[in-house]
Image (tube, helix red, strand yellow):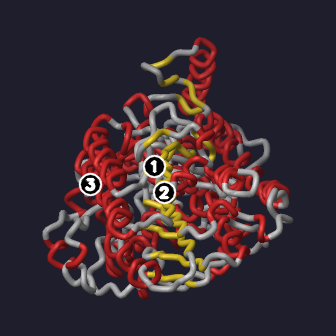
Amino acid sequence: MSLFTRSRQLSDTTEGKAEPDDDTGTADPDDTGTADPEGGTGTDAPESATATPAQEAASEQPPAAPPGAAKPGWFGWRRRSPRAARGISIGTSVLAGALVLFALLVPNRIEKIEFASFVRIPAEGVLLAGLLLALPPKPRRITAAVTGVFLGLVTVLKFVDMGFYQILARPFDLVLDWILIENGTDFLRETFGRTGQVLAVAGVIVLFVAVLVLTTLAVVRLTHLMVRHRPVAARTTLILGTAWITCMTLGVQIGTVPIATKGNAEFLGNRVEQVRAGLKDARVFEKQASVDAFAKTPPDQLLTGLRGKDVLFTFIESYGRVAIDDPAMAKQTDTVLKEGTGRLKAAGFESRSGWLEAPVTGAGSWLAHSTFLSGLWIKNQQRYRSLTTSDRMTLTNYFGKTGAWRTVGIVPGVRRAWPEGKYFGLDHIYDSEHLGYHGPYFSWTPVPDQFSMEAFERLEHGKKDREPIMAEIILASSHNPWSPIAKMIDWNDLGDGSVFHRIKKEGTDPTEVWKDPEKVRTEYRRAIEYSIRSLTEWVERYGDEDTVLVFLGDHQPVPTVTAGDTGKDVPVTIVAHDKKVLDRVADWGWTDGLKPAGNAPRWGMDKFRDRFMTAYGPQG
């Protein structure tokens, strides 16, 4: 028998009779055969619409155990040890109360969990207690059970929100985020292996079921307890209700936390509005996607300022503003960017940098990539699916439409079928299985960035007598969890990537790194430095007068790295050997070099496509 509920053996013919009040089907040893202190008796009493409170309380009491009846409780243990049994009963009731209070008061963000959060008066709890006391027995039992399940679901949603805030700096979207669950399980498998994935998923399922069951049993037990002690419960509810009104009116707080709260009502209200907005978003997006300033532009009038150039759009995973602005990282990152700027200048290249605001933070790289390329704000999976099944033209599509470029994709993070790839109009896509890499994964990262860039040179850029190339390159070494990290080696030693087995062994252990947020931040910074060096050294080594490189971050890293900063800015840089290429964007006001100034122009990432195509069109 559960410690939270009492068994009921009611038949259709005895509906409305007494409900046992303890964990077993018998009376408590101390109350057997005696009158209930609240005025009830130990006998069955029919329910009546005109029953007095004392009579209704009596109806909730158990009958005395008849002679020869089965031993009550755990094989008679309760009767043999009544004091211990009563102690356990009281302890279980206390735990039930604590669980319900926790579920009502726990915030949906980890950083808001503090002692003051759990000494508040929840309006929902007071109202629920009053409702349960007012209802007749059968509706009361149903309401208690339904409320327990609902409270459990709300608690689970709060836990999910905690995870989303830690990764994406936003709450879970009940309409649009279900696809991310699959992505999350894929990440677990790719990072911790199949066993780690199965254990994690099993643990989540067990936790989900446990929360629902325990909150339901807890609410049911507390309901029975209130009915058995109705006068005390009624007075307590009245006192708490009065205290809530008083504290709300006077604005009483503990620190910055108000004593009177209606947090669950506000939480659910926000969710309702979120669902409404999610359902309307499809119509809003369809209207936005129908507008394209270049849709009717003839192919020979597109991107005329880049004809004959090799144009590379390169994304550096999780390369956010925090890597440049955070005092703990700024000095080292600044050194790498200045070093890269100097080396590129010595090789004849100039660069300009600014800021873009990404649609996401923490994760969701594909949403940022499609925002940058499509000129639309792709902030959720619904929009991404709508985009990739539409005829909206992207930057890559327009390069292909001209017929002046071979368009290719270097996507080492893709390791399975990617049907959406066809939408971007690339002539050929090289995923992780087609780059010639025979080295190890670095946690999530299938191929180190330096090898990816060398593979691009070998497979496409280094070929003789080729046509100009437009490449979309997605570097993955700076992907969470940033441990272990590859390191730069002599380009001539890359071979088939086998050399990285030794490098991985020399790296850090992600399980150890993630025990300390400062270690996580350090490894993140080192990963960004590696990605930047991989890219700038490739340009220095293989770039020529026709090379044009646009590289940017896709989004900010997780809040563990940003230390709570919810900004979504990422750096963006254009590198070119031909001075005329940069002259076309002189009016953008971007900063010279690889590092954008703090006050450099900041655009939405969805604005880049049209500005870029305008700058390099006939009127640029």
Residue in front for this viewpoint, 63 or 616: 616
In contact (CB < 8 Å): disc 1 and disc 2: yes
Please indicate whether residue 468 sits to the left or right of residue 337 in the image. right
Q: Look at mark 1 in the image and give the residue it sits on.
A: 351
Q: Is residue 543 left or right of residue 533?
A: right
Mark 1: few, some, or many residues within 10 Å (few <14, many ≥20)?
A: many
Q: Disc 2 residue type?
A: Ala
Give me the C-alpha separation between circle 1 and circle 2.
Answer: 6 Å
The image quarter containing residue 505 is bottom left
Kindly indicate the quadrant of the structure image that contains residue 523: bottom left
Residue identifier under label 2 = 576
Assign a secondary structure to mark 1: strand
Residue 269 horizontal/vertical position (percent): 70, 42
Residue that numbered label 3 is attached to? 526
**Relative vertical location of residue 524 with respect to residue 543 in this rendering, above or below:** above
What residue sits 15% from the left and 77% below the top? 502
**Residue contact between numbered discs 1 and 3, judged by CB atoms under 8 Å:** no
> Residue 389 sits in which quadrant?
bottom right
Residue at the spot 25% in from the left edge and 64% down from the top edge:
485
Residue 408 horizontal/vertical position (percent): 55, 78
Query: Sequence order check: which comes first, mark 1 or mark 2?
Result: 1
Q: Could one spot residue 216 in this view of the protein? A: yes
First in sequence, mark 2 or 3: give its number: 3
Q: What is the three-letter code of the residue carrying label 1?
A: Ser
Identified at 65% across, 43% down, the residue is: 132
How far apart in space, not on screen, are marks 1 and 3 (Cα)? 23 Å
Q: Nearer the viewer, residue 408 or 378?
A: 408
100 vs 140, nearest the viewer: 100
Question: How far apart are labels 2 and 3 at the CA level?
Answer: 26 Å
Mark 3 element type: helix
Q: Residues within 10 Å of mark 3 (few under 14, many from 20)?
A: many
The N terminus sits in image quarter:
bottom left
